[in-house]
Image: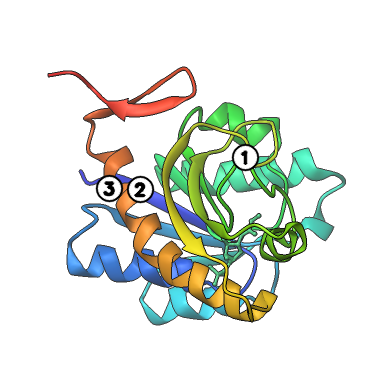
């Protein structure tokens, strides 16, 4: 059976779209079993349904706390035999129930070269700091925000006249290339996590 992926989103879902397209093109050999959003109006839910993918809105307000919301997500994932969880613009901290259910099986994409500029508005943080190069990172999710072992990164130069919008748009182009490639590596079985390093297994 092909690996079964879930994608968790909160909004636009352009990274979700890049994963949908890579699966359709056969460059990711997997099935997208479900897309889950914590926001009702997320455009990504429409993208998923347009592609014939099961798409769920799991409302945080229906649960007393974050762990209970996490447990509802875990139930939905386990019911669909998901083995890899990809956060794609999912703007919510991941708690112990989800981390414990999918050890080293949750990925995230972040719009900076980690460990620089963790958290919200990473592109604006890069502009405010004055760096000349920023980028995108795909990494494993741990209990620390934007801190797990790094799978892939891409650099993006900061231009003199950049705004958060223009910089975000160029980073996003790199993200759409990077995330499918990172998923391919995680699924292909020839890579492992060695301390903080994600590296090829020795033959
Ligand atoms: C992406 O730029 C992603 O890196 C970022 O949100 C955007 C989602 O866009 N994620 C974070 O900032 C997480 N801290 P999308 O919904 O079009 O994929």
202 or 95, which is in the foreground? 202
Q: Is residue 19 left or right of residue 23?
A: right
From mark 3 to mark 1, how far is it between C-alphas? 23 Å
> Would you place residue 48 above or below residue 199 in this image?
below
Q: How would you rate the neighbour count of disc 2 (Cα within 10 Å): few for under 14, some for 14-19, many for 20 or more? A: many
Relative placement, left or right, of 92 versus 4 is: right
Residue 158 on image: x %, y %: 57, 67
Above or below residue 12? Residue 98 is above
Percent coordinates x, y for residue 81 in the rendering: 39, 42
Q: Quadrant of the C terminus?
A: top left
Of the two numbered discs 3 and 1 on the same chain, state the one appearing first in sequence: 1
Q: Are marks 3 and 2 in contact (CB under 8 Å)?
A: yes
Q: Secondary structure at mark 1?
A: loop
Q: Residue 124's quadrant in the figure?
A: bottom right
Q: Which mark is residue 115?
A: 1
Which residue appears at 67% of the width and 40% of the height?
71
Quarter holding ligand 1: bottom right
- Where's the N terminus, which quadrant? top left
Numbered circle sitting on residue 44: none
Q: Nearer the viewer, residue 33 or 143?
A: 143
Dot 2 falls on a residue whose secondary structure is helix
Disc 1 C-beta below 8 A from ligand 1:
no
- Please tell me the numbered disc located at residue 184: 3
Name which residue lies at 56% across and 33% down. 148
Residue at label 2? 182
Q: Residue furthest right?
A: 64
Q: In the picture, residue 8 is in which quadrant? A: bottom right
> Relative to residue 136, is residue 146 drawn left or right?
right
Horizontally, residue 1 falls left or right of residue 107, namely left
Q: Classify mark 3 as within 8 Å of ligand 1 or not, answering yes or no.
A: no
Residue at image location 51% in from the left, 80% down from the top:
46
């Amino acid at each position: 059976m092909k690996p079964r992926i879930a994608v968790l989103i909160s909004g636009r879902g352009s990274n979700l779209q890049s994963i949908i397209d890579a699966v359709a093109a056969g460059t990711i050999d997997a099935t997208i079993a479900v897309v889950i959003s914590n926001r009702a109006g997320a455009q990504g839910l429409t993208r998923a349904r347009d592609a014939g993918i099961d798409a769920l809105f799991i409302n945080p307000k229906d649960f007393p706390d974050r762990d209970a919301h996490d447990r509802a997500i875990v139930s939905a994932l386990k019911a669909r035999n998901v083995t890899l969880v990809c956060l794609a613009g999912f703007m919510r901290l991941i708690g112990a129930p989800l981390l414990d259910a999918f050890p080293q099986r949750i990925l995230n994409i972040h719009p900076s070269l980690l460990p620089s500029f963790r958290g919200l508005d990473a592109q604006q943080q890069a502009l405010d700091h004055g760096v000349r190069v920023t980028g995108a990172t795909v990494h494993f999710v741990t209990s620390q925000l934007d801190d797990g072992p790094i799978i892939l990164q891409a650099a993006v130069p900061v231009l003199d006249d950049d705004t958060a919008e223009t910089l975000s748009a160029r980073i996003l182009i790199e993200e759409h290339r990077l995330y499918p490639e990172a998923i391919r590596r995680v699924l292909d079985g020839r890579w492992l996590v060695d301390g903080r390093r994600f590296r090829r297994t020795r033959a």
